[in-house]
Amino acid sequence: MGGGKKFGVLLCAEDSDYIKKRYGGYIGVFVEMLAEEGETWDVFRVANGEFPDDDEIAEFDGFVITGSCNDAHGNDVWICRLISLLKKLDSLKKKVLGICFGHQILSRALGGKTGRAVSGWDIGVTTIHLSSSLSKFFSSLEIPTTLPIIECHRDEVRELPPKAEVLAWSEKTGIEMFKYGSHMMGIQGHPEYTQDILFHLIDRLTQRGYIEDWYGDELKAKLEEVEPDKDAWKNLCTSFLKDRL
């Protein structure tokens, strides 16, 4: 049971029409994966300048930072404000889980470096290698050596913050997961995504000219063949956020 815990989703993207219709917005996608009975989940549309007040922060047990179409190495006003908030959450030792853009911006806020991925776009289901330190960190879980996850990014964490530790890597990306202390963790992939969300995202990327049509078709065909391990990722993320390590 949730025991009345309260969590905040720091939404760094606009909800697409499909996500609104199917899930009631990205908050619905995260609630579906992470929420348990008795908990409260609030959303702050940080990309639109909506942030929790300083006195509100204390009420929350943890925060999740979502993906975004923006670059984590950018200096938009809201991005700089988000970095300040993350530094504050670190000083308060609040639980923070960063996903994709959230993983990158969390690393940057703590002193790491982000930028365009040397290997280009990574879209689809990627198998990532989990380190032995991840098994130690999640001592209550049975951790496999590899796990498939949905990816959709062209930026990456290039250099970890001081004192941070790599928890996972892949053939394309050197830092797929990291932890900072026991209160902050970043995941480059999208544990919350379903294949239908990725299908619609591929359509949006081709429509906007980010990827070629033929590449989009190829990615969709590959998606039919492999599936992410949604249950394993759900266990990892909820165990971390809710201190069941």
Image (cartoon, grey):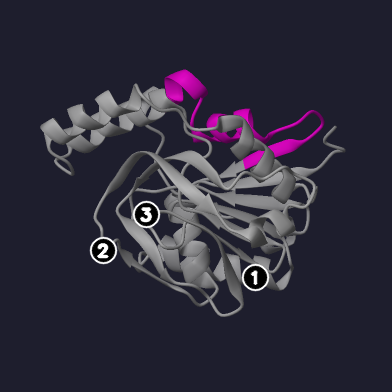
The answer to whether 231 is drawn above or below residue 107 in the figure is: above
Q: Nearer the viewer, mark 3 or mark 2?
A: 3
The answer to whether 32 is drawn above or below residue 232 in the figure is: above
Kindly identify which residue carries mark 1.
88
User: Amino acid under label 3?
Assistant: Glu
Q: Which of marks 2 and 1 is in front?
A: 2
Provide residue 193's location: percent of width, then percent of height: 47, 33
Provide residue 138's location: percent of width, then percent of height: 73, 52
2 or 1: tag closer to the N-terminus: 1
Q: Is mark 3 on a helix, strand or loop?
A: loop
Kindly identify which residue carries mark 3.
171
1 or 3: tag closer to the N-terminus: 1
User: Amino acid under label 2?
Assistant: Val
Range of residues picked out in magenta: 19-42
Q: Quick check: is 30 in the magenta stretch?
A: yes
Provide residue 107's location: percent of width, then percent of height: 50, 67
Provide residue 40's location: percent of width, then percent of height: 74, 37
Q: Residue 118 carries which label?
A: 2
Q: Residues within 10 Å of mark 3 (few under 14, many from 20)?
A: few
User: In the rendered image, which quarter contains the N terminus?
Assistant: top right
